Amino acid sequence: MATLSRRDWLRNAGMGTAVLTLAPGLFSSGLLAEEPRVPDHSRNNVSDADEIALGKRFAAELERESPIVSDSTIDPYLNSIVQQLASKSQRPNMPYTIKLINTYDVNACSLPGGSMYCNRGLLELVTSEDQLVATLAHEIGHVVGRHVVNRIMLSLEARALLKPVLDNLHKQNGVIEKIILEMGGAVAMLAMLHFSRQDEAQADLLGFYEMLRAGWDPHGFIKMFAMLDKLERASGGINIPFLSDHPPTPERLAAMKHELTQVRIPGDAVSDSLSFHKCKALAHLLPAPPKPRKPQPKG
């Protein structure tokens, strides 16, 4: 059987050659890295400022609809992880933030511009810091790849609503809020977004290199995918919303195992911490989540 080149491997995993150029200045010495280079603009040439404004509008609506919970230890811990990952990404200039949603659903999601959300259920499920970091790095990968903003714009275009949204992004006149409500609300809109498998594969790879550069051991992706694969098998074929649009977990696991053969992991790369286990314990002590009313946004 012929041996696949690394470029062929990535292409077969859904990564087109157009995104396989090297990202200059991002790599540590000695890495045989070939990270996807993302486009320098969003669909319809929407500017970063417009993307950030759009994300803020969606975030405001999502937080009105979702049971956001705050903890003086968990909040700074999650934001510290996000800031470290984002600083090593291809879009470090975006105003990344993360908040905790009080639901047992296992999920995390990101919005245009860098607003992110982690469900309590995810924090309670993962068993080591590198698993959590891998999941958040994947979500930052969606922001870096402009996947969320592009999918939202496609959805708005299909309903002839993109122009009124863009025309009112920087106006406080209630137009965008009305459009979001007419489309079922922010959570429902985000839950209906369908990332392509190429988007998901790209977010995995972008997250892998963000994690590596930020000082964490990207074996966390292997551990996370192995856990999800076990979860899928235990479900008896029941669809898990968190995984519905992603490539099959065994494929993602194989892709990350292959990627690990191409890089050198520093001896001091972080895989776990006392801070993680403290926050995980605190998550178990949070107030009981309210009964879910709306679908969860996809990660």
Image (cartoon, rainbow, N blue to C red):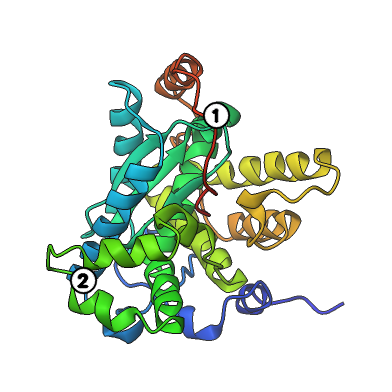
Mark 2 element type: helix
Using residue 242 as the reference point, say whether residue 288 is left or right of it.
Answer: left
Disc number at residue 205?
none
Using residue 16 as the reference point, say whether residue 250 is left or right of it.
Answer: right
Determine whether 88 is above or below 77 in the image: below
Using residue 258 as the reference point, say whether residue 107 is left or right of it.
Answer: left
Tell me the kind of residue under disc 2. Answer: Asp
Tell me the kind of residue under disc 1. Answer: Ser
* Residue found 26% across the figure and 68% down from its top: 51
* Residue found 45% across the figure and 30% down from its top: 102
Q: Which residue is mark 2?
A: 50
Crowding near the residue tagged with mark 1, few <14, some 14–19, many ≥20 C-alpha atoms within 10 Å: some
Residue situated in front as seen by the camera: 169 or 46:
169
Residue situated in front as seen by the camera: 235 or 79:
235
Using residue 223 as the reference point, say whether residue 263 is left or right of it.
Answer: left
Q: Where is residue 54 shown, x and y percent of the image?
A: 26, 65
